[in-house]
Image (cartoon, rainbow, N blue to C red):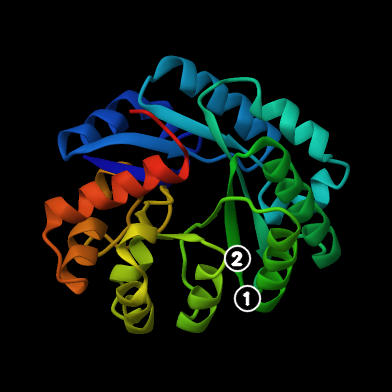
Amino acid sequence: MIIDSHCHLDYEPLNSNIKSVIKRAEDVGVKYFLTICTTDVSFLKILKILKENKNVFGTYGIHPHEASNFSNLSTENIINNISKDNKIIGIGETGLDFYYEHSDRKIQKQLFLRHIHACQESSKTLIVHSRSAENETYDILSSEYKNKKFKILMHCYTGSKTFAHKLLDLECYFSASGIVTFKNSKDLSETFKSIPKNRILIETDSPYLSPEPLRGKTNEPSHLIHTLKYMSKIRNEIEENFSLQTSENFINLFDLKI
């Protein structure tokens, strides 16, 4: 069994072909999917997807790129939205993106904190996006974790080994995307080799970041098999064992019975 821990089934071209997309994934062993919210419009589409597909779970959250458009979003709003379907199992994706800076840094931090507080109140898992903001991301997560523990998933992890091992002290999980298969990602491969096997998940982030040998093409959950094969190889693990381990990690992180 393989689980795509982060995809965007509400995005095109996936959404208009969702039955075929899911069937192709199931044919290569991907049995469950977590489709990730980025805006309120995204969330409405996700609620529909959850009702129509029993093996898809979802989240509610506002992407840091969109933070400036949702500056009034409250922790109460977030908690209200995650209660709308029992298959909403996480909060995010949220976090900090200081690479593109589509939203003001201060507003990104404020919204990040509100998402964290919603996790602390609801016991849901936080899905974190962090780019060019390692120090700021760690400072916020570690400070809040000291106040009250919460579960953290670093989505599409591309950070440094040092950052990863600091985050392990917060009991974080790390999700590998197709980026780890890229030829210029040797350092990232070394980082994922150093992370304990019970802390690793895999994802597509589809329709983005298609892995080798499909880099540059529209990504979809069926392509996760290439990331699985690559990760198994670099960690010197049997592919079936690694897929079961990452699925078990997902189930444990989100406290599921599937």
Q: Decide if residue 220 is in sight here.
A: no
In this rendering, position of residue 113 left or right of residue 171: right
Q: Are marks 1 and 2 in contact (CB under 8 Å)?
A: yes
The residue that label 1 is drawn on is 134
Of residue 138 and residue 217, the one placed in the foreground of this image is 138
Residue 92 in percent (x, y) is at: 62, 45
Residue 245 in percent (x, y) is at: 26, 51
Q: Determine the secondary structure under disc 2.
A: strand
Instruction: Give the label on residue 130, or none.
Output: 2
Query: Looking at the figure, which quarter contains the C terminus?
Result: top left
Of residue 91 and residue 65, the one placed in the foreground of this image is 91
Rate crowding at label 2 as few (under 14), some (14 to 19) or many (20 or more) other CA atoms within 10 Å: many
Q: CA distance from mark 1 to mark 2?
A: 7 Å
> Which residue occupies 49% across, 76% down?
165
Image quadrant in which you'd find residue 163: bottom right
Q: Determine the secondary structure under disc 1.
A: helix
Q: Decide if residue 241 is in sight here.
A: yes
Instruction: Give the label on residue 191, or none.
Output: none
Rate crowding at label 1 as few (under 14), some (14 to 19) or many (20 or more) other CA atoms within 10 Å: some
220 up-or-down from 189: above or below: above
Of the residues shown, which amino acid type is indicated by label 1? Glu
Residue 150 in percent (x, y) is at: 62, 50
Residue 192 in percent (x, y) is at: 35, 72
> Which residue occupies 21% across, 71% down?
235
Of the residues shown, which amino acid type is indicated by label 2? Ser
